[in-house]
Image: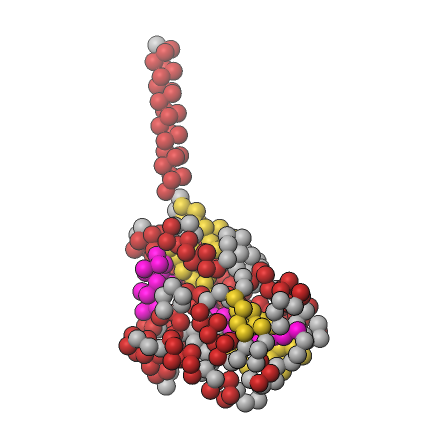
Amino acid sequence: MSISWRLGRASILALSAALVVTSAAQARELRGWNLHVPDYPGSIAMEEFAATIAEGTEGRYSGSVFHNGQLGDQRFAIEQFAFDGIDFAVFSGGSLGDFAPALNIVSMPYVFRSQEHMFEVLDGEIGERLSDALADHNMVALAWYTGGSRSFYTVRTAVRSVDDLQGLRIRVPDADIFVATVEALGANATPLAFGEVYTSLQTGVIDGAENNAPSFESTRHYEVAKYYTLDEHLMVPEALVVSKTVWDGLSPEDRTVFRDAARASAQTQRSLWAEREAASAEVLQEAGVEFIEVEDKQPFIDAMAPVYERFVTSEEAQALLADIQATGN
Ligand code: BDP
């Protein structure tokens, strides 16, 4: 009697343990890659995305965001998607372009007339086309963040014209479109990981770099580089992507939760971005950075012809560019 009671109790315990294991297996914690510091606009927006999917799926999915490039540099992180090593991330269109060439077309120098033009392009049918282009790399782009405009900053000499860039060693992210853009302007493009730029500026390995004001500020590169030339050569969008493996396993309801959460997080990112741009400009000015306005951008724009010749070759790329240019007109 007592033995059977014990067995009965044991099997009940085993059964409830099995139930716990089953529900734990169903709750999936997604790993999120992020390059930036935790208080960066995109970082806050990614956290919001993670919290919203946890709430909306009642805990079936949750997300942890690893900030500061803790999970590796951007190229490595993009590659990790193929192996399900990372489940969601915010990637630069320019970095994705090395993998899916369509992404280069929205990362071309001076391709957008304004930030509004960029949002109109990405939030519409073109954004879907770009997402489809990422499928081979096991990604789905759910929403688009802004990466602001990238401009040059230098240590020793102020850049006031294209002439001033000739032969300068300028750090760029490790991706073709960045290298080609900076080389077309006559500088020596030096691809380096984001985290290596500060010391490289300090030790004179490079003469300068290029980025938007929030990144120039959050990395503290302004402690070394005191000239910021607002030529705005690149306006590169950033994609909030999730792994296609994860996406394919979602129910239609959960897909809606993910998509809505992504879009809401993009709205958050875009409004935080505007605030951070202004705050960063203030920090830079207080630190004594000289802002150099470029009155006439035409020589910079003209210098980009070889970049267009190199990247806009296929019919698909030409059609995409034409559609971007026709959007909002
Ligand atoms: C930041 C972008 C990030 C780039 C980084 C860089 O958000 O995607 O990789 O610049 O310059 O502004 O490496």
Measuring from the top left, give residue 257's x and y in whole percent. 37, 57
Residue 203 visible in image: yes
Q: Camera-side residue: 108 or 276?
A: 108
Residue 170 in the image: above or below residue 27: below
The residue depicted at 36 percent of the width and 33 percent of the height is: 19
Q: Place residue 239 in its image quadrant.
A: bottom left
Q: Camera-side residue: 213 or 234?
A: 234
Q: Camera-side residue: 216 or 181?
A: 181
| Residue 235 inside the magenta-drawn segment | no
The residue depicted at 39 percent of the width and 35 percent of the height is: 21
The residue depicted at 40 percent of the width and 34 percent of the height is: 20
Range shown magenta: 129-155
- Which residue of the protein is positioned furthest toward the front in this rendering? 167
Where the N terminus falls, by quadrant? Answer: top left
Residue 303 in the image: above or below residue 100: below
The residue depicted at 30 percent of the width and 55 percent of the height is: 252
Measuring from the top left, give residue 175's x and y in whole percent. 46, 67
